[in-house]
Amino acid sequence: GAVVSQHPSWVICKSGTSVKIECRSLDFQATTMFWYRQFPKQSLMLMATSNEGSKATYEQGVEKDKFLINHASLTLSTLTVTSAHPEDSSFYICSARDREREQFFGPGTRLTVL
Amino acid sequence: GQNIDQPTEMTATEGAIVQINCTYQTSGFNGLFWYQQHAGEAPTFLSYNVLDGLEEKGRFSSFLSRSKGYSYLLLKELQMKDSASYLCAVLDSNYQLIWGAGTKLIIKP
């Protein structure tokens, strides 16, 4: 099956710093990539949808200036959490959709902000 | 609005069979997914149904009835490693995945 990678797997940072998370589709071209956030014991929450070469579409309540998404190519999307605070600590998961519209998930990135 | 319902938690015995139900009300329907998620990990794909009926894949089977807005995931010969959350998700008319809150399955020896 198709493989999606995320880097880093986990990151600890100080409050006020920025963190970049990469999402790559390794063996297919992803026309659309999704970024999700999952707090403990809660369901996945869609943060934004990004199409290659265009601006991301953010879900209601998600600050676009705080969560910067760049989808520069058909195999790479990045999420930058700017000026991170402890309440941003969460599990961030990306997924990529291929031309058949099947969605494949990355392994997730656990962010802890001190 | 869009809504997906599944039980919050279920308990079953090792070696037994368990059925996890999912009902949905969405704007359009382009298929229903079941994912398995172990604690601290990303979801992994289990099944995809877009037509009515039963799809069998090893110990796992998934059923769909579009007219009833209903699906179930059937797990046979339960193993301890099956302890996880099982997420039901529907692809709506905009091809966006709408997620259920997940069912936490606890397997007891």
Image (cartoon, coloured by chain):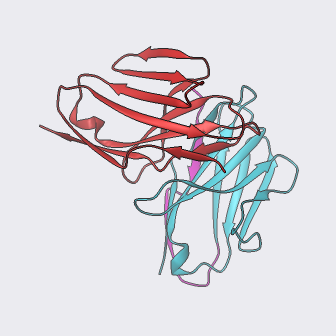
Chain colours: A cyan, B red
What is the x, y in percent for residue A69? Answer: 75, 60
Q: Residue visible at 72% across and 60% down?
A: A59
Above or below residue A38? Residue B6 is above
**Is A7 situated left or right of A79 in this image?**
left
Q: Quadrant of residue A37?
A: bottom right
Observer-nearest of A78 and A50? A50
Q: Quadrant of residue B82?
A: top left
Q: Residue furthest left?
A: B109
Please state the horizontal and vertical placement of residue A114, each as a whole percent of the image.
47, 81
Residue appearing at x 50%, y 37% in the figure? B23
In-front residue for pair B12/A46: B12
Could you say where residue B84 lies in the image, as x and y percent from the top left? Answer: 33, 43
Query: In this rendering, is residue A88 above or below B55?
Result: below
Residue drawn at x 73%, y 37% is B95
Residue B86 left/right relative to B75? right
Is residue B108 within the magenta segment?
Answer: no
Quarter holding residue B40: bottom left
Residue A81 falls left or right of residue B49: right
Query: How many numbered circles are shown?
Result: 0
The spot of residue B12 in percent (x, y) is 21, 36
- In what quadrant of the picture does the C terminus of chain B appear? top left
Residue placed farthest to the front in the image?
A: B68
Between residue B13 and residue B83, name the one nearer to us. B13
Residue sitting at 25 percent across and 25 percent down? B17
| Magenta range | A1-18
Is B29 located above or below residue A15 in the figure? above
Asked whether residue A16 is drawn in magenta, I would say: yes
